[in-house]
């Protein structure tokens, strides 16, 4: 019985590793540091498809309306790259820490990205 439980756990672990190795981001956190009010609040997360199949970024959602995403809408071919562009509303003074969820329909995976910083007066 213990053998089967271990085998199932190993298969799940290896399956998760395969999915993680299909998409590589240049970074998963962007730290703005302290930025001026009404300054450019945009940043870009670049990703690369290192699998042997096209990669489809089906949706990008943010944790609040103060963060607006745009992203590569066409399938990313093997070896190709895409981007997720984020614009934070720098009219809001104070510290921020926001989460962006990128959903890939192929391979059926979500990646969490983060932006953080502080907008000065």
Image (cartoon, rainbow, N blue to C red):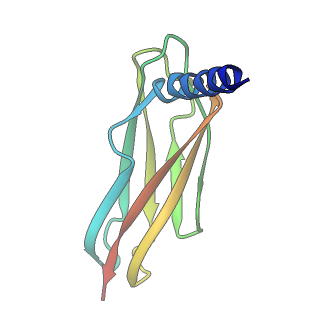
Above or below, 47 against 113 in this view is above
**Horizontal side, residue 67 vs residue 27: left or right:** right
Quadrant (top left/top right/bottom left/bottom right) for the N terminus? top right
Q: Residue at x 48, y 65 (%)?
A: 98
- Of the pair 19 and 62, the residue shown nearer to us: 19
Which residue occupies the foreground of this view, 113 or 1? Answer: 1
Instruction: Report the side of 36 relative to 97 (left or right).
Output: left
Q: Nearer the viewer, residue 80 or 116?
A: 116
- Where residue 47 appears, x then y in whole percent? 40, 33
Image coords of residue 5 (percent x, y) = 69, 27
* Residue 113 located left or right of residue 15: left
Q: Quadrant of residue 10?
A: top right
Residue 87 against residue 81 in the figure, above or below: below
Q: Residue at x 62, y 25 (%)?
A: 6
Determine the residue located farthest toward the right in the rendered image: 1
Residue at the farthest front position:
1
- Residue in view at x 64 percent, y 20 percent: 7
Find residue 77 and report its horizontal and vertical position in percent: 49, 16
The relative height of residue 3 versus residue 61 in the rendered view (above or below) is above
Question: Which residue is outermost to the bottom?
Answer: 121
Quadrant where the C terminus sits is bottom left
Give the percent coordinates (x, y) of residue 41. 36, 65
Quadrant assignment, res 34: bottom left
Identify the residue shown where x is 42% and y is 80%.
91
């Amino acid at each position: 019985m213990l053998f089967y439980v271990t085998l199932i756990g190993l298969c799940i672990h290896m399956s998760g590793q395969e999915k993680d190795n299909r998409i590589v981001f240049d970074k998963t956190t962007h730290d703005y540091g302290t930025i001026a009010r009404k300054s450019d609040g945009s940043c870009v997360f670049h990703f690369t498809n290192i699998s042997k199949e096209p990669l489809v970024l089906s949706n990008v959602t943010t944790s609040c309306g103060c963060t607006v995403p745009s992203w590569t809408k066409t399938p990313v071919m093997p070896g190709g790259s895409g981007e997720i562009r984020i614009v934070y509303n720098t009219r809001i003074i104070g510290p921020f820490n926001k989460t962006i969820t990128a959903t890939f329909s192929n391979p059926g995976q979500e990646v969490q990205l983060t932006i953080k910083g502080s907008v000065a007066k």
